[in-house]
Amino acid sequence: MTPAIATALISFEDYATYDDGTEARYELVDGELIAMNPPTFRHMLIAKFIEKCVEAEIQRLGLRWLCFREAGIRTGIRKSRLTDVYVLTPEQVSDLIDDSAISQTPPLLAVEVVSPDSITRDYRYKRAEYAALEIPEYWIVDPLEAKITLLVFNEGLYDETVLTGNQALVSPTFPQLALTVEQILAAGNLP
């Protein structure tokens, strides 16, 4: 885990307005600011592809939902995580429109793309925190292991389906979204 950059605990409210004058990004974990390494280009290409596909599906369905990349989710009293992609309703955004892009309520869908420094964070910590929030659907896209873990919230826990190769990702939130693991992972390659 990346070392904490501050020794004094800070509140969520202080985190939401924190600015150290750099482009650095942080998560808040138990009141400590945790610096996030910049993602790899593969990571960014995959997240951008997922965002575009989800936005296209939202448009196709005529929904008012909003898809965001690299925004936050408040996961506890002194906790906030940065996601790669998530989907919110307009109601979830309207009261926070001029605040930091940190959802105060569970998104409809959260997606994390695994990087070498985020394996434990994405598979363990975020999974537990997202389940505690009852986020209905969580994808862990893992280009390192060439798989996607689809997690669907069910009675307090996530039901897990691990997909590889040309298996289709069947999203409960977007059941007609036609994507395979290969297509999603291939987005991380240069043409």
Image (cartoon, rainbow, N blue to C red):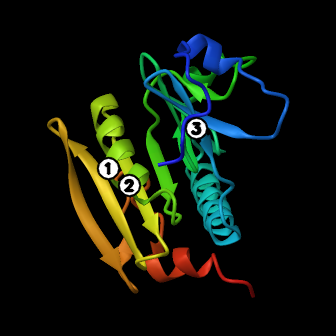
Q: Residue furthest right?
A: 21
Instruction: Residue 96: name its quadrant.
Output: top right
Considering only vertical position in the picture, is 16 above or below 167?
above
CB under 8 Å between discs 1 and 2: yes
Element carrying mark 1: helix
Report which residue position mark 3 lands on.
Answer: 65
Report which residue position mark 1 lands on.
Answer: 124
At label 3, the amino acid type is Trp
The CA span between labels 1 and 2 is: 5 Å
Instruction: Residue 22: name its quadrant.
Output: top right
Element carrying mark 2: helix
Location of residue 42 in the rendering, given as x and y in whole percent from the top left corner: 65, 72
Residue 95 in view here: no
Sequence-wise, the earlier of marks 1 and 3 is 3
Q: Nearer the viewer, residue 134 or 1?
A: 1
Q: Nearer the viewer, residue 162 or 4?
A: 4
